[in-house]
Amino acid sequence: MKESKLGDFEETILLIVGILGEEAYAFKIAEEFETQTQRPVSIGAVHSTLSRIEEKGFLTSEMGASTSERGGRRKRIYTITASGQKALETSRNLKMALWNQFPAFAGGKLNFSFQ
Amino acid sequence: MKEAQPPKLAEKFLLLFLKNDLAEEVLGDLDEKFHSMLDKRSVRRARRNYWYQVLNYLRPFAFKFFKSNSIYTTMIGHNFKIGYRILLKNKVFSAINIGGLAMGMTVALLIGLWIHDELSFNKHHENFDRIVQVLRKDVEDGIVEVNSSLVGQVGVFMKETYPTVFDKVAMTFFRKSPQLLTVGKQSFDKDGYFFLSDAPEMLSLNMKAGSRDGLRNKEGILISETLAKTFFNDENPMGKLINLNTRANLQVTGVFEDLPTNSEFGDATFFASLELIYDEENPFVWNNYNMKVYAQLKEGVAIEDVSVIIKDIMKPHRDPEDGPMELLLLPMKDWHLNSTFEDGFQVTGKRMQYVKLYGLIGIFVLVLALINFMNLNTARYQNRGKEVGIRKAVGSLRLQLINQFFAESVLYATAAFILSILVVYLTLPWFNEISDKGISIPMDNLSFWGICLIFTLVTAILAGSYPAFFLSSFGPIKALSGTLKQGIASVRLRQGLVIFQFTISIILIIGTITVYNQIEYAKSRPVGYNQENLITVRGRSSEFYQKYDILRSELKRTGVVTEIAEANYPLMTTLGNNGGFRLMETDEPYGFSFNTIFVTHEYGKTTEWELISGRDFSRDLGGEETSIILSESAIEKMGLEDPVGKKLVSRWEFRGRSKVFTIIGVVKDMVKGSPFEPAMPLMVFASGGSESYLFIRIAEGANYIEALPKIQEAFERVLPSHPFNYEFVDDAYMTKFRSEERIGSLATFFSALAILISCLGLFGLSAFMVEQRTKEIGVRKVLGATTSNLWRLLSKDFSILVVLACLVAIPLASYFLGSWLEGYEYRIEIYWWIYAIAGISCLIITLLTVSFHSLKASLANPVESLRSE
């Protein structure tokens, strides 16, 4: 069976791909990851994760247009697929359900709102 | 300026392993990363980061796979696979092989790093090839001596007269000693240099704060990062005040990055202005040899041309009575390794000799390991012979077999290298300590790894060549029918190699024992005074000079001090040198100079020197300003029969006294300089006090833990603001043996490894020999041979080899060590028992190693070995 679970790091990367939209390629994703999480990461690590998520079918990618920057080389732009979207939602729902059962926060004392 | 580009080598490396269809996007991403790094950080950082990113692409998803069907790659893969299986099949054998090789490689790596460190001495300075030191060569008593102390005016003259030749000239104080630096309540003795203001620029100090101009102001001081941390922690040190020797307040005008330990000035914690040291209006004169002169040549000026120019600078300023003097230049590349002169000519320096010696030892130890590899592999010819036979029978070419064996040795060498790098990493701190170095593995240096790769491959080829050609030469029929006999030549060769191994080991053992003997001999040399229970305090401030008498009575009142004395320099040095004395009755002055020292009257009682004739200085007899005490060797050198009462005339006045002195006493020689050289002829003058070194004799049997606080308390009562920093005289004396002890520890380490490697090889060899003779042993046992008979039979062969090795090693060792010992005036003979110990211990070690297998074989039940037919 094809692996379809989403690891923690993978989930974060997937979300960042969603945030970046048209600008989602390995270098930008690594930069965004570093600014959002304050954790250093190498481009290679991000790239390898991206290709792994792509194998699971949560991402698709295609080469973008060539630009004069970066020596005229093209970028590979990643986009979230429908099943990727679904995997993210499943993961969020699971976490929400778990949070709701957490005694300290159960009973709606804390008002989380996820939009 | 051209825009910085990503490192080309890293790009090439990336493309080497990266899938082709990923290349474009990855290169693009990394390019972008590089440029975004450039905006924020230095080019260096950006380049390093690029490498980091490239290495992080070493992930399975990005690799292109070598799935080609080429026959060559398949064959190579096959060779390694077989090699790996053989390695696993006989684990003990592989462990011996890899372990031995790893030990040899460890030694080679350590020595390689050490030599690299020595050869790159001073190279850190940007103007390395243009910096020179000015030396003088003078003739005294027919002996040509090269010296580095010069008159300060030489530097001034050079700069003013030849501005087109010398870019910068910097003088420093000749005698360097730790200086007392104080900030607030913290005081430390720190090493540093007093220089002219050009020095920081000349030495290309890497400034972390302030500028290299910081010494233009006399009250400025440049401090090292470490010192800044010690005094000011994380505060900004710039502009802070530091007190020097309780005399001058200096302002921090710069902080420099610590110089590497392999720099001439590596111990510098500060640089301050030269003018601080001299009270005179103009310290640069033609007749006081109290400075060292360094210069930086203009670009494109050849040292040889400059040497001609400066040669005779001193000529017009010399007293015609004095001997001739020439100046010469020593380029920076020779400062550390080649600064030895003999008869005025530059010869190979002692350090350079050590570099060569250690290099040689490193190569030899590695060769020992290679020999093990060859011996063990060829000894297994019967096991491998069958394999070779089958391969040949099914159509293998000889070249293919050779390749197979080389693949194996590459596998072994690589495993050994990985092991040895690990060992080097773990042992470096210890190695640095005994060799007094600050070496680290240059992990981020690509050329280091490149050299390591070449080193490993060369080792593999050297180790594998003989087994590869030997084993692949078997004829298939012979090999398969089991009648393979090895020729007498290969047996002889193997024996020769074992003899070679043990020759090296024995030489190293003899060397180690001799070095330690020499050190012990010099340590137990009679020094002519009592070093125990004696401490030295260095005077720093003016109040120190005026309170000798009160200090003396206060200290003696503590009950733990028997006597104190002062002198104008420490007990463990021979700093004062003066010539030009003659006997009253003659006109001809003596052609040698005396080691002169000014001491207070109690010096004799404090040091407990041994008076041979005459009397000691005495306070009751007045000033004693015209009295001198000489040492035994001085009397001998002067050729005096009955010295006491004789009068000496000096060419100069000493401290404004008369020029005529009366010898009142003779003492035993005092060893104050190098313990390996004859004691200098000593001449002692009496002084009323006001000298800067204080010696305190602690009462015999006094407990230091109680005595020292008492002394300190009395000291601080008399001199409240003076630091009580003391040093034990016997400790100071022991530091004189440090460089010899360093050689001793290294020699021990190398010889231990050499023996271990040789024994590993012998252990493996004896295992195979016993295996081959299993049947023979069985038959002998059945016929009634005893265990001891068999043990003797099996051990005999190897013992003969060791005895032969002894015969080769002894003359070689006595030659090498004889020439090493010649460097010491005060030295031991190489006694016969040293050879005996080395030889016998080697023999015992060999027997123990071999006995493991020979005893095992001779104790075995013969039924076991004879049954399997």
Image: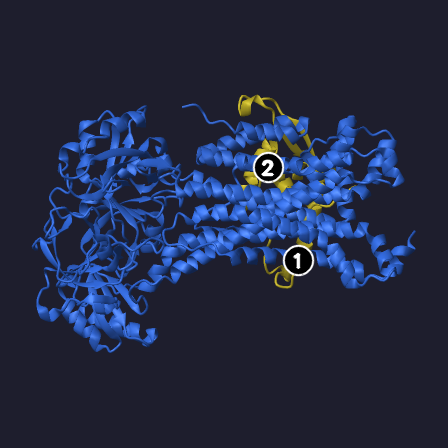
Chain colours: A yellow, B blue
Q: Is residue B489 left or right of residue A18?
A: right
Q: Position of residue B622 (x, y in %)?
A: 8, 67
**Outermost residue toward the front in this view:** B641
Residue at point 45%, 44% (across, down):
B354
Residue depth check, mark 2 versus mark 1: number of the one nearer the observer: 2
Secondary structure of residue under mark 1:
helix
Pointer 2 and pointer 1: residues touching (CB < 8 Å)?
Answer: no
Chain letter for the residue marked with disc 2 in the picture:
B
Q: Tell me if mark 2 has few (under 14), some (14-19) or many (20+) residues whose alpha carbon lies within 10 angstroms of its own.
A: some
* Rendered residue at 24%/56% (across/down): B636
**Direction from residue B341 to residue B312 in the image, left or right:** left
Q: Position of residue B861 (x, y in %)?
A: 85, 62
Residue B145 in the image: state x and y as whole percent. Answer: 27, 41
Q: Work out whether residue B310 can be spotted.
A: yes
* Residue with the mark numbered 2: B455
In the rendered image of this protein, does residue B769 appear above or below residue B69? below
Residue B474: percent from the left, percent from the top? 81, 34
Asked whether A112 or B767 is in front, the reply is B767
| Amino acid identity at mark 2 | Phe
- Label 1: how many Cα within 10 Å (few below 14, some 14–19, many 20+): some
Q: Taking the image as drawn, is residue A9 in sight?
A: no
Q: Is residue B745 above or below residue A44?
A: below
- Residue A59 location, quadrant: top right
Give the structural element (helix, strand or loop) at label 2.
helix
Quadrant (top left, top right, bottom left, bottom right) of the N terminus of chain B? top left
Question: Residue under mark 1: which chain is it in?
Answer: A
Q: Amino acid at mark 1?
A: Asn
**Above or below for B449 versus B508:** above
Same subunit: marks 2 and 1: no
Residue B466 is drawn in which quadrant? top right
How many angstroms separate mark 2 from mark 1 (CA)? 63 Å
Q: Which residue is mark 1?
A: A100
